[in-house]
Amino acid sequence: MKNVKGYLSMVLHTHLPFVNHPEDDNHIEEQWLYEAISETYLPLIKYFKMLVEEKVQFRITMSLTPPLLEMLDNKVQQEKYIRYLQKHIELCQKEIERTKYTNNQENELARYYYDRYSNDLYMFKDVFKCELIPQFKFLQDVGRLEIITCCATHGFLPMLYINEKNIEVQIKYGVETYKKYFGRKPRGIWLAECGYVPEVEKYLKKYEIEYFLTEMHGVIYSKPVPVYGVYSPIVTPRGVAVFGRNVGSTMEVWSNTTGYPGDSNYREFTRDIGYDLNYEYIKPYITHDGVRIPTGIKYYRVSDKMDNKDYYNLQRAKETAETHAYDYMQKSIKQIKMANEYTKGKPPIIVSMQDTELYGHWWYEGPYWLYILIKKIYYDQDEIDFITPGEYLDKYTELQVCEPAISSWGSGGTNAQWMECEYADIYIHLDIMAKRMCKLAKKYKNETDKLKIRALNQCAKELLLLQTSDWYFNLTCYRVMEYSYERINTHIERFNKLYEQIKDDKIDEEFLKDIEWKDSILNDLDYRIYQ
Amino acid sequence: MNKLEVIKADYNETKLSILITEVNWLLAYWTISKKYNNRFIKKYGEDFFERTKEILTVKNLKNGTEEKIELKEPTNNYYIKFNYSDSIYQVELSRVGKQDDKDYGYKIISNKIQSPNIKILIDDYNKSKIKFKNIKSGEELIETKYYKKNENSKEDVEKLYNDLIKPAWNAYKKENGYKEK
């Protein structure tokens, strides 16, 4: 029996924007999903299942966003992922040959990647039958994961709340999508980008969300001051619990300057054979139009030198992850002991929140680190334990009533990472389109014509897809600019074209069918919600 | 159309919106219909827009103050710095006479927004205002078994923030580009 003084709550946010191009066999942005499956989701599932088999008790919280769930459930995407793996296995075979007599270290790593991608293919296709959602569901059903939901299309609510219907729809269909895939209602929600404005609260209450998570200042800048800081959740006046991010515990694993991922024994993210090898050789494995992209096959470890990096050593990286897991555990225990002095006997909670993709995609050794951390906390000490926010609320029901502060986890703590004046036209589109959607819903609230109902639902989907926060983040960070503009313009065009067709009663069924096929998300959505 | 630009928002509707961008900055953006503008041309003449200037009035609805900003260049957006956290702001876009500030009734009003609180409210600590709630039963409580009389004094809370919370938060803010002012 553990003598628990406090708790560690690891909350992983699992999200990718909805990218679905059934019309194109080699759409580069679709690879975001395949990279995430191979580097993050499959390793995490593997380690979590190993822990279940080893009978190690642990509790992790994961959000799985509706766009990601829809993509994981998409048959075409599943087939494309299999082809992605087959291509990678083929490239690994070539690499094994290429390095056979010339470079032992590269050859050893090429064999490792060959085994890894081959195993991914076997697990995904033969064991999981291409279905990853049931794997997460299994882990929730056996009591190891607490899966929470997110906004329907990852809409950043502080940018959308001028029209409160936007908030309601984002939350309602976050909840509905969760129910569809997990057969129960979610207890918690990860508000996209941790974006909180007070207008959100009544819809969280309406859709029976018990808790949400904010960046640290969402809690510590609350009114009145929370007497336990972020070491206890607070509760809003309407009765929704709020957990604040413990940034100290987050930075250890999140920061690439002061955190663990920057250690020189870990795998270097930026160097990749997609950029390094002879163009003609690598050409079949980069984009169709010949743009070099990362392949996931990386031979080097982190070091300051840009060109002459040292080779990655798997064993050394594993040992470092073990040391870092021990360090994280010790720091967590120390923090809990200190916090305990102030919480007057109420066991404090450390809420450590990160993007799930940090584990494996950005920090290659992250999933193994988490596996070791869980085992160490289970076997090697008895002062802290894992807990999920939901479980904490079941144990400690009396919370301080506070008004959380307006906040996000973006740079600067507010909205600048999604909003800049040069994109003002986009925000006008967002406002007017939402207004038009509400008008349509009112005008056609009793509509019975099936074609028009389809068009109205698709209109709502186009608006929701335009609200995806990722496009705006990309624009302000100057990354994936062309594709982000393309997506923004596409959804604006599709919405407005449908809007005119509905108004004029001249719906082009072929056009509608085409965009229903491409933007096939939230298929249970009913436009009447916008009334 | 250039691949790195967005479709122009040309809806022929009139709307002025404001949103917070940073802790003490908001972005006002607007679109004005031809119909709205034509109303004033019809009433005051073809040179209405030459004779008038565009003004943004920033109102703090909590303390009743307001500030006027003259827009020198044609635009559909403007960054506005505000001074008070935890206040309610609203903006009006108007046109007034260039010479005499005459009000022609050209006025578009924005939504209202709350500005974020940007500090730990430790100085406002008042034990009598600390309330608890049982989240299962909904019952409101003055104190809990963890929060008894004579415990969690202002000094206790201050110490918690000084020892544990502020050091982590300050280090994070530094790394994450957080601005207080």
Image (cartoon, rainbow, N blue to C red):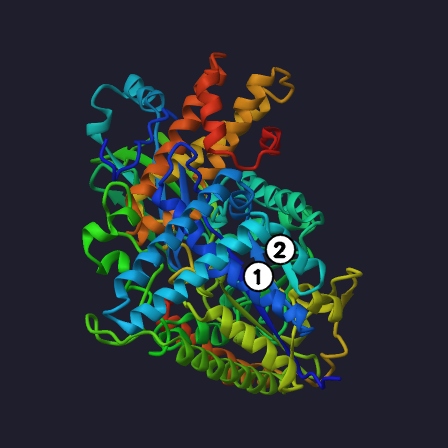
Looking at the image, the residue that sits furthest to the front is A101
x then y, percent, for residue B91: 40, 44
Residue indicated by mark 2: A135
Q: Amino acid at mark 2?
A: Gln
Badge 2 element: helix
The quadrant of the picture occupied by the C terminus of chain A is top right
x then y, percent, for residue B83: 38, 60
Disc 2 with disc 1 on a shared chain: yes
Number of on-image labels: 2
For residue A124, side relative to residue A57 (left or right): left
**Are there few (<14), some (14-19), or many (20+) residues within 10 Å of tag 1?**
some
Please state which of residues A262 and B15 is positioned toward the viewer in this rendering.
A262
Q: Is residue B84 above or below residue A323?
A: above
Please state which of residues A135 and A249 is positioned toward the viewer in this rendering.
A135
For residue A487, side relative to residue A306 (left or right): right
Please state which of residues A423 and A260 is positioned toward the viewer in this rendering.
A260
Q: Which mark is residue B137?
A: none
Query: The residue marked by circle 1 belongs to what chain?
Result: A
Q: Quadrant of the rendered structure where residue A272 is? A: bottom left
Residues at discs 2 and 1 in contact (Cβ within 8 Å): yes
**Are there few (<14), some (14-19), or many (20+) residues within 10 Å of tag 2?**
some
x then y, percent, for residue B52: 24, 32
x then y, percent, for residue A129: 59, 48
The quadrant of the picture occupied by the N terminus of chain A is bottom right
Q: Amino acid at mark 1?
A: Ile
Badge 1 element: helix
Q: Earlier in the sequence, mark 2 or mark 1?
A: 1
As measured in the structure, the alpha-carbon distance from the residue carrying label 2 to the one carrying label 1 is: 7 Å
Residue indicated by mark 1: A45
Q: Residue at x 60, y 41 (%)?
A: A173
For residue A368, side relative to residue A93 (left or right): right
